[in-house]
Every structure is written in C-alpha cells, then in structure tokens.
Image (cartoon, rainbow, N blue to C red):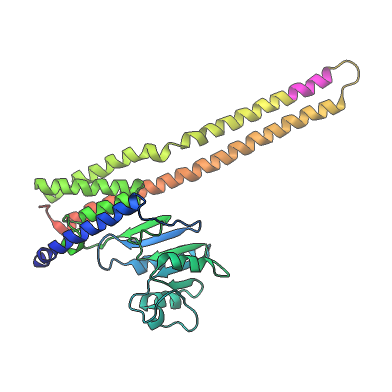
C-alpha cells in the first residue's frame, strides 16, 4: 500500500488540481448548477472507490418510501445501453446495470432510472405521469451540474482520511473540500476534526493524546455551531409569550366593551354586549391558537437541533474511536 501511494502521488496531485479548478468554476458561477423544487438527495463518496453507497440508498428507500413516492437515478455502471432508461418489466442487469437492477427487484414500488446525464435523468423522471416526490442520486456528489438539496457523503469505515492527498494516496484535503461544499453544522464540526488531525499528526502526539485533542476540537466546534442552530428559536419563544399576552389583551378589550354596553343608561344594548363578548372569545381563541402553534414549532425545531447535535457527537466519537483503533499512534 505504501508503494502504491508513492506511485499514485503524481496522479493524485494532478487530479487534485483538476478537481479544484472545476470546483472553482462552479463556485464562481462560470459553470452553472441546476436546482429543482423536488427534493434531491445525493449519496456520494469522499474518496475514490466503494464505500457502501448502494446499501445507503437502500436504507433511504426503506426510510422514505412508506410516506413518499421515491425514485433512484444513477448512471448504470457497466450497462450495455445508453441514455435515459426507466426500469420496467423488461429491465435486465445488462440494460440498466447490476446495482440499479438489484434496487428494481428489491423495491418494486419505486421508480428506478439510469442516465449518465443526471440533469436529463431528473427532468425525464419529473415528466412521468406519476413524478416522484423524492429523487435519490447514487454516486453523484461529483456531478455539480445538479444542485442537490442534501448530500450524504460516505467514507470507508476501515480507511478513514489519514494522509492529506487525494485518490488512494490519502484523502484529508479532499474530505475538507467536501465538507466545505456540503456546509452545515455537521460538516463544519467534521472539518474541524480533520483539520485538528492534520495538526496533531505533524506534532507526533500519541494515539490517546491525539484522540483527546480531536474530541475536544469537536466539542468546541459544536459549541460554536449551537448559536447558529438556535438563532431563530427566540422568535418562536417570543411568539408563545406574545400570543398569550395578545389573547389576554383582546379578552380584556372585549370585556370592557361588553361591560360598557351593560353600563349604558336604560336598556342594555344587547348587540353591543354580544359583540364585546364575541370579541373577547375570538381574541382568547386566537391567542391560545398562536401560542399552541408556536410551542409545537418550537419543540419541533428544538428536536431537530438535538438530532443535529447528536449527529455531530456521533460522528466525532466515530472518528476518534476509529483513529484510536486503526492507527495506534499518529505519525
């Protein structure tokens, strides 16, 4: 493996330059990315080679298909056909490729399509009589002509990023670039862990010292990300209070009008009395409904924040434990 790394080093540098230039063209909008209203989820690699993309696609199908109409789209590796093909009763592994055919036979209730041109494939799926509600793109992270709503990036469990070159000569820089493209709190925390790993590797710390420093870096990154995750939560908590206070104020205003009608000289104005009571009740109901909705939304987004925080902790723990188990010591 060491010899292979040295042999591939020149190709790794060249590949890195080409990838960087291409990404720069997309980042500066010289090359265009197309976004779609239909949710697009990409499952891709952080490195060249197999990392279990198809099992991840199958997991997402099981997760989403009970509630949404799902379609998968891939290039159809090693198929004997070309262009867009939507799998049907005549589909074979030679026609659509081994992995798409596997998905088609295991999940007959979803749409399985292949097309090397991902944009064309998405557009063809959306033109179907029953267009999908969610499209899963297999091995499409490098296809930046499609701007996905979410990218799921995979790395081999037993070969995490250790040296800072691309291809099989090492992958840390490529992983950091992938985190920059993905963005978001989880990606930012993982990027911090990878950068810290580069630093401690150069200093020659032991495995336990390096693991502790990486873990501490992830904790600090999580602490910095929390204000960004919670920055709009105060709006919802304020709506809870304002809804209650607004309802109370409206109730008081309506009751003032009702008692004003009772206090009028002579026979009480029944219409004014009813209007005042009605206004009080409407304002009370509106305040309660506003507060209830705000509480539900607050709890919903709070649970999302907890899920993201857990994901960051889980990813950090996985990185630390894997480095400790596989490397023994950082060099």
Say whether residue 35 is magenta.
no
Q: Position of residue 307 (x, y in %)?
A: 40, 49
The answer to whether residue 163 is above or below residue 87 is above
Magenta stretch mostly in which secondary structure?
Answer: helix
Quarter the N terminus occupies:
bottom left
Answer whether residue 71 is visible to the viewer in this image. Answer: yes
Q: Which one is nearer the viewer's eye here, 216 or 46? A: 46
Q: Position of residue 182 (x, y in %)?
A: 34, 52
The magenta segment is 255-263
- In percent of the image, x 77 and y 32: which residue is there? 278
- In percent of the image, x 42 and y 60: which residue is there? 41
Q: Which one is nearer the viewer's eye here, 210 or 19? A: 19
Please give left or right for residue 268 compared with residue 182 in the image. right
Say whether residue 261 is magenta.
yes
Q: Position of residue 241 (x, y in %)?
A: 56, 30
Number of numbered discs on residues: 0
Please give left or right for residue 128 compared with residue 329 in the image. right
Q: Position of residue 144 (x, y in %)?
A: 36, 58
Answer whether residue 160 is visible to the viewer in this image. Answer: no
């Amino acid at each position: 493996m060491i010899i292979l790394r040295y042999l591939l080093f020149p190709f790794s540098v060249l590949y890195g330059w080409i990838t960087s230039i291409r990404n720069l063209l997309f980042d500066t909008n010289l090359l265009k990315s197309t976004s779609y209203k239909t949710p697009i989820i990409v499952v891709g690699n952080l490195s060249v080679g197999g990392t279990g993309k198809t099992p991840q696609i199958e997991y997402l199908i099981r997760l989403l298909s009970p509630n949404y109409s799902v379609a998968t789209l891939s290039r159809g590796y090693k198929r004997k056909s070309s262009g867009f093909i939507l799998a049907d009763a005549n589909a074979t592994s030679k026609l659509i490729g081994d992995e798409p055919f596997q998905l088609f036979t295991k999940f007959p209730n979803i749409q399985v399509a292949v097309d090397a041109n991902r944009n064309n494939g998405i557009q063809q799926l959306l033109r179907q009589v029953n267009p999908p509600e969610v499209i899963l793109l297999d091995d499409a992270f490098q296809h930046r002509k499609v701007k996905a709503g979410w990218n799921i990036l995979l790395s081999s469990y037993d070969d995490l990023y250790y040296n800072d070159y691309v291809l099989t000569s090492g992958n840390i820089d490529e992983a950091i670039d992938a985190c920059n493209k993905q963005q978001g709190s989880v990606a930012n925390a993982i990027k911090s862990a990878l950068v810290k790993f580069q630093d401690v590797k150069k200093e020659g710390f032991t495995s336990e010292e390096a693991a502790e420093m990486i873990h501490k870096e992830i904790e600090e990154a999580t602490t910095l990300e929390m204000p960004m995750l919670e920055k709009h939560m105060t709006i919802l908590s304020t709506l809870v209070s304002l809804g209650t206070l607004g309802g109370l104020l409206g109730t008081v205003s309506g009751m003032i009008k009702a008692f004003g009608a009772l206090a009028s000289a002579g026979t009480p104005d029944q219409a004014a009395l009813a209007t005042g009571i009605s206004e009080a009740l409407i304002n009370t109901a509106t305040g309660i409904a506003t507060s209830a909705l705000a509480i539900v939304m607050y709890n919903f987004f709070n649970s999302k924040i907890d899920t993201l925080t857990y994901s960051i902790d889980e990813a950090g723990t996985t990185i630390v434990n894997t480095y400790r188990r596989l490397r023994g010591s950082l060099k």
